Image (cartoon, coloured by chain):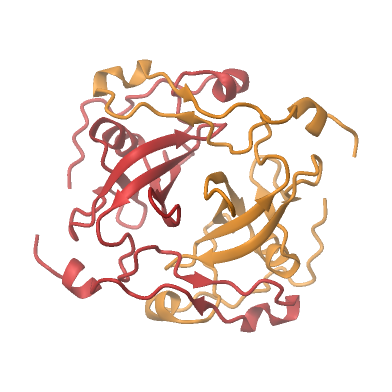
Chain colours: A red, B orange
Amino acid sequence: MEGDLADSAPFAAPAAVAELEDGAALTPKFDADGLITAVATDAKSGDVLMVAHMNAQALAKTITTGEAWYFSRSRNALWKKGETSGHTQRVVEMRIDCDQDAVWMKVEQVAGACHTGRRSCFYRAVPLGTSEGQLRAAKLEFRDARTFDPKAAYGKTK
Amino acid sequence: MEGDLADSAPFAAPAAVAELEDGAALTPKFDADGLITAVATDAKSGDVLMVAHMNAQALAKTITTGEAWYFSRSRNALWKKGETSGHTQRVVEMRIDCDQDAVWMKVEQVAGACHTGRRSCFYRAVPLGTSEGQLRAAKLEFRDARTFDPKAAYGKTK
């Protein structure tokens, strides 16, 4: 773990809506918990690999290093993707959305993004057209098989 | 606006981690505000169009109707995408992630997803490799032009 950005608020403050949406200034709008949403897609296939959060430090480290950093809400900690598993994400392109509270990154993903051993965290499909009364019994369909052994990747000592 | 799902909790409750991640039961894990994150990508290009939130009703309506519904945090209201603009999203496929707190939808987007007039909300790129000291002065690069007139789309009376 590293959490040592010199400035804990390295970004300019959000502007009024017109500037936020149509200006060229990077002014990320962090929520009450200090977070924005981050979506990582596979730079080759376009598949969504994972959705997670970034605080200001994680966003700053991602921009400055070109490798994806996130903030874990459950562990309350800054986290470099691949820190334990080696499954890092090199950021090919980063986009920010209209109101600057979400980023989309196209990444080169080593091995797989998901801690369960799949390339993407989104390995199950939801059956569309299910009737309202059947939602509680809806069955997910597995679409992606495991591509690596999560115990080998995450169980090892750093 | 519609907000009239008969059952306000139409989904089964989240299970323990093993079942949540490796089971076939749809048990979405809503956060303290009753929301999950929803990412919509263009079914053809793979581009991320928007990131928003769904409450249980929005998720249920999306699954049952095959058209995207969201929950607006700012307006505190259930919201059908395209309700005002006509720029609806037909859901081609929906995936749910490992811990069932985010969904990814591949959609057929009418016109554009962004209220600013672009196809995607992610029309600006963040300059990677910017040094820490320059983050406050970082300039976004516009990558996508407007494809429709937002005043014509959103200004009209329903």
Q: Is residue A16 above or below residue A97?
A: above
Q: How many marks?
A: 0
Q: Is residue A54 above or below residue B92?
A: above
Where is residue A119, by image quadrant?
bottom left
Q: Looking at this view, is B40 or B25 the one in front?
A: B40
Judge left or right: residue B110 versus residue A92. right
Percent across and percent down for residue A32 are 48, 39
Percent across and percent down for residue B140 are 44, 22
Percent across and percent down for residue A34 are 41, 38
Q: Residue furthest bottom?
A: A137
Considering the image in quadrants, where does the C terminus of chain A appear? bottom left
Q: Residue furthest left?
A: A157
Q: Residue furthest top?
A: B137
Where is residue A104, by image quadrant?
top left
Percent across and percent down for residue A58 are 31, 39
Q: Residue at x 27, y 28 (%)?
A: B129
Q: Residue at x 76, y 46 (%)?
A: B82
Q: Is residue A65 above or below residue A90?
A: above
Q: Looking at this view, is A13 or A69 the one in front?
A: A69
Q: Residue at x 78, y 67 (%)?
A: B5
Q: Looking at this view, is B141 or A154 the one in front?
A: B141
Judge left or right: residue B75 versus residue B49. right
Judge left or right: residue A15 versus residue A39. right
Q: Residue at x 54, y 60 (%)?
A: B103
